[in-house]
Image: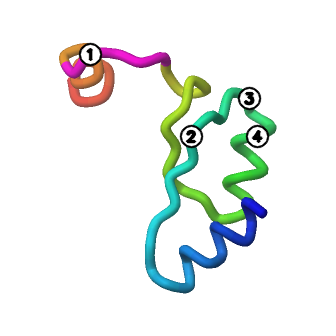
Amino acid sequence: MINSIIDMSKKIGVDTLIEGVETAKQFERLYAMGCKLYQVFYFSKPVDLESFEKQWFD
C-alpha cells in the first residue's frame, strides 16, 4: 500500500512525506521505494527552531 501511494504521488508530481520512521531498516525500505521526505524520530527527536538552526545551519 505504501509503495502504491508513493508511486501515485510521483505520477501526479507531488512529494510524499513519511512520518513514523524509527529504524534504519524502515528508512532504507522507504528510500528504496522512492520516498525522499521524512518527519521522524530516526533522524532527530523534536527540537525547537533555535536548536534546529544551530544543528543544521551553523
For label 2, the residue is 19
For label 1, the residue is 48
Q: Position of residue 43 (x, y in %)?
A: 54, 27
The mark nearer the N terminus, 2 or 4, is: 2
The amino acid beneath tag 4 is Gln
Q: Which residues are magenta?
A: 45-49
Tell me which residue sits at (35%, 16%) in the image: 47
Q: Secondary structure at mark 2?
A: strand
Q: Secondary structure at mark 4?
A: helix
Q: Is residue 56 above or below residue 5?
A: above
Image quarter of residue 53: top left
For label 4, the residue is 26
**In the drawing, does residue 53 fall left or right of residue 15?**
left
For label 3, the residue is 23
Circle 2/circle 4 CB separation < 8 Å? no
Disc 2 from disc 1: Cα separation: 18 Å
Q: Mark 2 or mark 4: which is in front? A: 2
